[in-house]
Structures are given as C-alpha cells and as structure tokens.
Image (cartoon, helix red, strand yellow):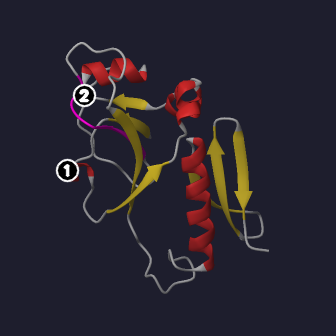
Amino acid sequence: MRYIGNAFAIQMVPDGGTIDIEPAKFSPGFIASGQLASRILAGRKSIVGHVDLAAILGVDFNRESITLQPGDDLLVAQVMGGRLPEGTKVLPPGIEIKFFYVRIQVEDRPYGSPFGRDSIYGSIFKAAEKIAAEYGGKAMAMQDGHGNFIAAVDAPGLYARLWDD
C-alpha cells in the first residue's frame, strides 16, 4: 500500500521490521507545477491527521493509525519552520514542507546469501527502490521464465525492469 502522512511513529513498524528513511528530493518547481499531486500523491491513501496540511496537500484528512508492512511506502510530509496557523490554506512565509520516504524491510535471508541486501541482487533491488521512490511507485522482486532475478519498477507513467547481465 502507498500512503501519504504527516508523521511517522515507531508503532507503525511491524515486529522484525527495519526502517529505511530517505529524503524525497522534489524541486520547488515540481511541487508548484502540480506534478507532486498528480504524479506522486495520486493513488496514495491519506493518513494525514492535520486538517490544514491535508488541505494544502490536496488530500483527505484522515487520523487513521496504521502498521506498515514490507513493501508499503509511506511518504511523510513534514512541516518545517514552525506550526501551521489554524485555518491556513497556503504555506506562510518561513514555513516549508519537506518530504521523506519511509519503507519497512523484513530481512528473511541472511546478509551473506545471494539474495541478501548486500548482494548483486540486493544492489539491483535497492536501485529499483530508489527509482520507484523518485517516481512515486513501487519496486518488486520477480523472476523471468528461466529463473533469473529481475527487479521491476511500477510507477505512474513508468514501468522498468532491472537485472544483471
């Protein structure tokens, strides 16, 4: 599941999960052009529990608590530089929103295995995750008909496959 939220809490991490947090690097022009809303936020379930921030982002206000699962993608919209004044519909001067991707990993293979995160396959999958994050999609591990490892990226307007050759 893909989410947009205004906070991340430790209670969102399932037992045995590890957290990957990565800043999302959206340019001000990208955000101002409406592409953030149409390419990144579209299709995400809102768990934004701040009514004014939800209005600024153009997403539903929803104070739901969740537990993230492996493969889930939470984009956190963090207000920086102060608190939003009550009833605001645009960001006041000096206040900005920074975005962070939070992903949960449950490592079920030892790091030394051929499919561990530090292996060639793990490196390919990490590259796929990075591309997926940039385009607001998700990365998936797959096999072709011959049993070869493939990391696929499925994002709005983009489908890609990465493999070792």
Report x, y in % for residue 2.
45, 39
Q: Is residue 51 visible?
A: yes
The percent coordinates of residue 12 (x first, y second) are: 25, 49
Q: Is residue 101 above or below residue 83?
A: below
- Please rate how many residues cluster around mark 2, counting C-alpha atoms within 10 Å: few if below 14, some from 14 to 19, many from 20: some
Side of 17 relative to 37 (left or right): left
Q: Is residue 75 visible?
A: no
Q: How many marks?
A: 2
Q: Magenta stretch: residue 77 in it? A: yes
Q: Which mark is residue 40?
A: none
- Give residue 89's position: percent from left, percent from top: 34, 14
User: Which secondary structure lies at badge 2?
Assistant: loop
Q: Which residues are magenta?
A: 73-84
Q: Could you tell which of marks 1 and 2 lies nearer the N-terminus?
A: 1
Q: CA distance from mark 1 to mark 2?
A: 16 Å
Tag 1: amino acid: Gln
Q: Quadrant of the C terminus?
A: bottom right
In the picture provided, is 90 more to the left or to the right than 35? left
Residue at the disc numbered 2 = 49
Give the camera-side residue of 25 and 140: 25
- The residue identified by callout 1 is 11
User: Quarter of the image holding residue 6?
Assistant: top left
Residue 18 image point, x, y percent: 33, 64
**Magenta-drawn stretch, dominant element (helix, strand or loop):** strand
Residue at image x 64%, y 45%?
154
